[in-house]
Image (cartoon, grey):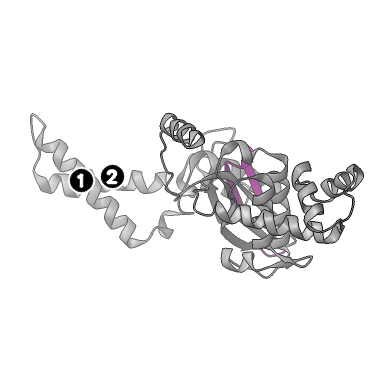
Amino acid sequence: MANITASMVKELREKTEAGMMDCKKALTASDGDMEQAIVWLREHGIAKAAKKQGAVAAEGLCSFAVSGNKLVTFELNSQTDFVAQNAKFIELLDTVGNIIVNSNATNTEEALKVVSNGKDVETIILEASGVIGEKISLRRVNVITKTDNQAFGGYKHDGGKIVAVAVVDGADANVAKDLAIHIVASNPEYVSKDDIPADVVAREREVILNTALNENAQSAKPKPENIIAERIVPGRLDKQLKEISLLCQNYIMADQEQTVEAYLKSIKASVVTFVRIAVGEGIEKVETDFAAEVAAQAAAAQK
């Protein structure tokens, strides 16, 4: 059996960034063969990461990456916010973004299969999970393209807790970035009122009508129901639809009070599309009793 020296452990640790004891175990298991030790660590890192697959990864960061006329937005989740601030996690975020934007992937499933330097993205993330010590997962990969005459603009709020990207026509990247800042703050759902699907409009009308009828029923002087439906509801509905439409919102980046649409018209520009994502949207977080969890671990340790 080979003599495992401190310098060998140090070299392996520098190459893999694994812990000293893990490096020593890997070298012992591989009889001092450095390459085999790296393989051993990879295999065991994946095994550790695989055990975490049942955990919920609802923290993390959103990001975007640009390559020419192509941009991708995506979310990389971790189990805790603390890990999301880790330098290795942020490095992984950048690595994954660069790999995806320079590939032909158009969604998350395709992105996970993209190969870079002999490893697919899924393996890269899985190995990082083993090193970092938490389940890490990729989701919501979205590709946006533009023409040479259009411009991208992106903004990351709070390091990537919320990310927005806008594509503008007739203006530069600075205008697009300012628009992205507005989108992060105002959270529009559609570019214009015309983009809102009919079923969404119908649902909003129904909610507003029922609310107005309930308010009217409790009023000291109730109005006829036809007045509610024909006069009150249309106004409230229009106000609600404007609130979720980007072009109708008051532009927070303007020097004076004006809508996004008015501002863009004043500079002879238009918005083509936008994307806004926030960490953890759509993920059901598991609420845990921390005290009970600590007590359970303590009890298990005594057995």
Left or right: 49, with 247 as reference point: right
Q: Position of residue 258 (x, y in %)?
A: 51, 38
Q: Position of residue 239 (x, y in %)?
A: 34, 43
**Which residue is labeled 2 in the image?**
235
Q: Position of residue 198 (x, y in %)?
A: 33, 62
Chief SS of the magenta region: strand
Q: Is residue 161 visible?
A: yes
Q: Secondary structure at mark 2?
A: helix
Placement of the N terminus among the 4 image quadrants: bottom right
Residue count near mark 1 (Cα–Cα under 10 Å), binned few <14, some 14–19, many ≥20: few
| Residue 195 position by quadrant | bottom left
Q: Which amino acid, mark 1?
A: Arg
**Which residue is labeled 1 in the image?**
231
| Residue 292 position by quadrant | top left
Q: Is residue 270 visible?
A: no
At a point 68% along the width and 52% down the height, the residue shown is: 128
The residue range painted magenta reads 146-165
The residue closer to the viewer here, 280 or 218, is 280
Against 295, residue 195 (above or below) is: below
At a point 74% along the width and 60% down the height, the residue shown is: 67
Q: Which amino acid, mark 2?
A: Gly
Circles 1 and 2, Cβ within 8 Å, touching? The answer is yes
